[in-house]
Amino acid sequence: MTPEAGLARPADGEGASDKAPIDPDIDLHAQSPRGETRTQRWTLLIAIAIGGVLGSEARYGLSLALPHPAGAMPWATLLTNVSGCALIGVLMVTITELTSAHRLVRPFLGVGVLGGYTTFSTYILDIHQLLEADRPGLALTYLAVTPISALAAVWVGATTVRLLASQ
């Protein structure tokens, strides 16, 4: 968060707990969010698209490295979603609390790379395929384990970065 945009983050204990950080991509002093130039919008979309391609390719590579037969646990999808969520925790703490990142870092890495890498739509498809393979117990287990693990991974990633930064 940049102080010059009037978005200085209060230190812990100074009212920081009652407000979430403000989106650093929006200039609150502009007449409207449409105050961005066309060039800025295109650079944002290009950054997201390039990041999405990179993240999707990484996910595809992991699915090739860890294939699973029908009716088996989809380890590649689980690993992708959990590791992606851990990286989202690391990224968000790093760019909102520790650094003043370029305006395209979060869209490129967060929306593009990690958005393309994680695949919760495939998670739903995997559950459907497990049910079709007559594996309701495994489908239910996978249904519960994935979001719990993903949320825990975000917390672990964020907490680890905070701990490392405080030393």
Image (tube, rainbow, N blue to C red):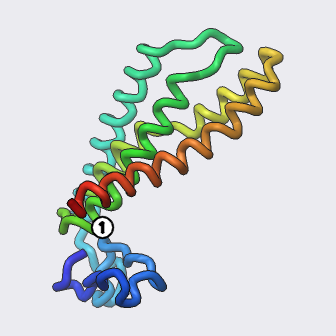
- Which of 66 and 122 lies nearest the eye of the viewer? 66
* Residue receiving disc 1: 96
**On screen, residue 124 above or below 163:** above
Name the secondary structure under disc 1.
helix
**141 left or right of 81 in image:** right
Q: In this view, does 18 lie above or below 87?
A: below
Q: Which residue is drawn at 51% across and 13% down?
A: 67
Could you tell me if residue 42 is visible in this image? Answer: no
Quadrant position of residue 113:
top left
| Three-letter code, disc 1 | Thr
- Count residues near mark 1 (Cα–Cα under 10 Å), then give few for <14, some for 14-19, many for 20+: some
Please name the residue shown 18% across and 63% down the image. 102
Looking at the image, the residue that sits furthest to the front is 167
* Total tally of numbered discs in the picture: 1
Residue 135 percent location from the top left of the image: 79, 19
Rendered location of residue 68, percent (x, y)? 57, 13
Residue 105 vertical placement versus 148 (above, below): below
Q: Is residue 154 left or right of residue 135?
A: left
For image coordinates 40% across by 89% down, the residue present is: 15
Q: State whether residue 2 is above or below residue 135.
A: below
Instruction: Place residue 116 in its image quadrant.
Output: top left
* Residue 70 in sight: yes
| Figure quadrant of the C terminus | bottom left
On the rendered image, what quadrant is the N terminus found in?
bottom left
Name the residue located 52 percent from the left edge and 48 percent from the top edge. 152
Q: Where is residue 114 in the image (x, y as percent from the top left)?
A: 38, 44
